[in-house]
Image (cartoon, rainbow, N blue to C red):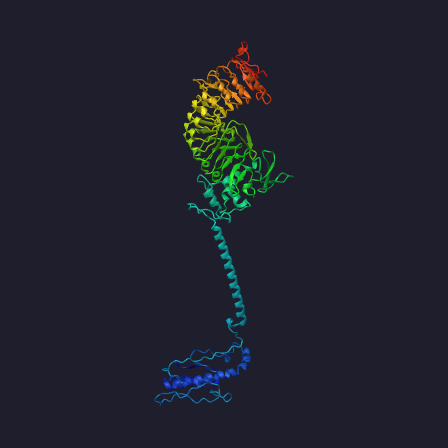
Amino acid sequence: PGRPRAKEPKSSTSNQLWEEYKKVARTDNSSSSSSKQASAIVKMADEEERKKKKKKDKKKKSSRREREPDDEENVSLPIESGEASPANEAAVQVVAADPDDPNNEVIPSSIPEDPQEGGLFSEDGLAVAMAVDTTAEDEFIYAAVEYDPDSKPPLYKNRRFRVYSCIALVIILSVTVVVAVYITKSTKADEIVNLNVDYTPPPTTSPTSAPTTNREASGIKEQIEAGVLQRGVTFQDLDKKKDPRWLALDWILFKDQMQLQSNDKNLYQRYIMALLAFSLDSLAWKSCGEHREFDPKFGNLTGEYIVENCTVLDITGEEEEHGVWLSSTPECTWYGAICSSDDVLRGLQLIGNSLIGEIPPEISQLRFLQFLALNGNCLYGNIPPELSSMPNLLSLELQGNILSGSMPEEMYDATKLQLLNVAMQYGYNEKCQRSNSSYVYTLYAKGNPDNGYNWGLTGNVLGNHTSNWKSMKGLHLFDNSFTGQIDDAISELKYLVFLRAHNNQFWGLLPNGMTYLNKLREVYLNTNSLWSDLPPDVGMMEDLEDIRLGENRMYGTIPASFYNLVKMKKIWFQDTFECSNVTDDCAASSVEGFEGSLQSEIGNMKDLSMLVINNNPLTGTLPAQLGNCEQLSLIHIHQTNIEGTVPKSVCQLRDKMLNTESSSGIFYADCRPNNKTGDPFFTCSCCTDCCDHTTKVCVADD
């Protein structure tokens, strides 16, 4: 150990020296001086060998290429660490140590120089090695490595490789930067879109599907769901193929070319109008509902939401241009829409336009709407109670449809309402054709004969809650099935001008509080079940122009104050009913009704144009002062107990308005022979129609 080992030479010349070297090694006492001398000689041999290799490098290069790999004589043995490197198959020459030497040192023989190169090698090219001291420190022995002329430098030292590697690295960095910038911008764009979402719905127990488009993820759906949909409905609850609320959303998101965003101020407005179009079958409308385009040659559909403009005749016959519903035009240009200068919908008027369907409650979210007129259509179902929550609604006109059910109690909360017209919900035989060619019949509930007849709206609409309508000016309730008494609370309606509640089932007395309505011009309470006289203070209703109480169970005399109503134009007290106590059947009768006689003060009503008092047990004669009413065009005094002869002043009215130029049957009286043979009950030379007082048969005489 620690001793340099020489490679065993294979040449016959150095075998003897090799055996001797091994013998010396066995007898070596590992003295320090011998080891150091041997180590020095080996280092000198290595240095000399390196010099020789550098000089012969070019010559050996060509010879090594021709060397065969299996030529054992020409292949060097592998050199281990710590061995001396022989050159040209040289062996190490050692000199045996003297056994009589007390230090037992190995004395190396002199190393003759190579006669050709002048190195420290023997004639046979063997290096002379000295014994190595085992106690000496280990020193690194440079191992001779055979040089390979065909070997190439490592790949990382190749210049071309380094250039290409740098180029590739630059390209990779550039691509990475571009991708990073793109992802950053895309993420930023999504964040900007998401900033428009003002409403975050609460978490649900069931998972929802991921949005498929940016429009669906823009917050529009959530905005409409939170701000428009009513009665706790969500879009998830709706039929996506049929429900008008979903169809309107789909139109807003994908088909409307305006492509509104969630923060657009007219989003609710445009959505609700689209909802009306889908709910009320706009394709069947009489005007401006057809947005589809057809090929005139073949009559087939070529596209939807294409037609944008329509022409409608106004009341004067002039043509007006409007936008078609569900077109890409601004909703304020759509037919029937009335907007203020800031493009806010203030009114919606679609009268007689063949609207078919139920009124969606979401219409109540048109918060700035002031009047809504959908009369003269085929609207069925109930009146949405949500209409009462519209803070600016002043006028609601729904007459001339086939609505049913009770008047919502919530409607009494509409304290700003000035006009409520829900009249004419039954008794009209019309039909409307849907866009799918089916029909809706106005005689039947919801337009379907299978549902039976429609009896219109019900409930006690003139009860004590009526006092909430303090701004009301017009109540139009006729042709329905409203019941109950007219409450005295009606006296709170100080601004009421029109009360038309005829052809219902109101019963009881006329409230005396009604006489405080001094702005009331029209009172239509005929054809009900009233059993009442006229309030004594009826004369306080100084603006009254038209009063109709016929076909009720009226009684009593006409109050004297009644003749103070100098603005009166029309008096309809005809056909007072007599009802059976057994069957409750009622019929017009001259036995029951208003009593007494007409007073001469009736001449104060100079604007009176109609006096219809037939079928009442009135007595006395016809006042001559009636001739002062030069506007009279209709007089019915038959089936009464009025006797005598018609005054000349009244007959002179025939030369004025009381004539037959516009109509017949304008002056009726019991001027035919009574009971066919007797004297006439009333003598009249200028009447147009004379009746038999007993048989009640009337014949035109003029």
Give the camera-side residue of 343 and 431.
343
Q: Position of residue 323 (x, y in %)?
A: 57, 40
Please tell me whether residue 254 is drawn above or below residue 17 in the rendered image: above
State the residue lying farthest toward the right: 297
Q: Is residue 334 left or right of residue 465?
A: right
State the residue lying farthest toward the left: 102
Q: Position of residue 308 (x, y in %)?
A: 58, 42
Question: Where, by quadrant of the figure, is residue 631 drawn?
Answer: top right
- Which residue: 55% across, 29% down? 430
Question: Where, by quadrant of the figure, is residue 436 drawn?
Answer: top right
- Is residue 108 at all visible to an observer of this figure? yes
Q: Position of residue 220 (x, y in %)?
A: 49, 46
Q: Is residue 26 left or right of residue 196?
A: left
Q: Quadrant of the C terminus?
A: top right
Q: Position of residue 425 (x, y in %)?
A: 50, 29
- Is residue 553 at all visible to an observer of this figure? no
Please tell me whether residue 378 is drawn above or below residue 650 in the rendered image: below
Give the camera-side residue of 209 and 365.
365
Q: How many marks?
A: 0
Please tell me whether residue 502 is drawn above or below residue 93 in the rendered image: above
Give the camera-side residue of 305 and 14.
305
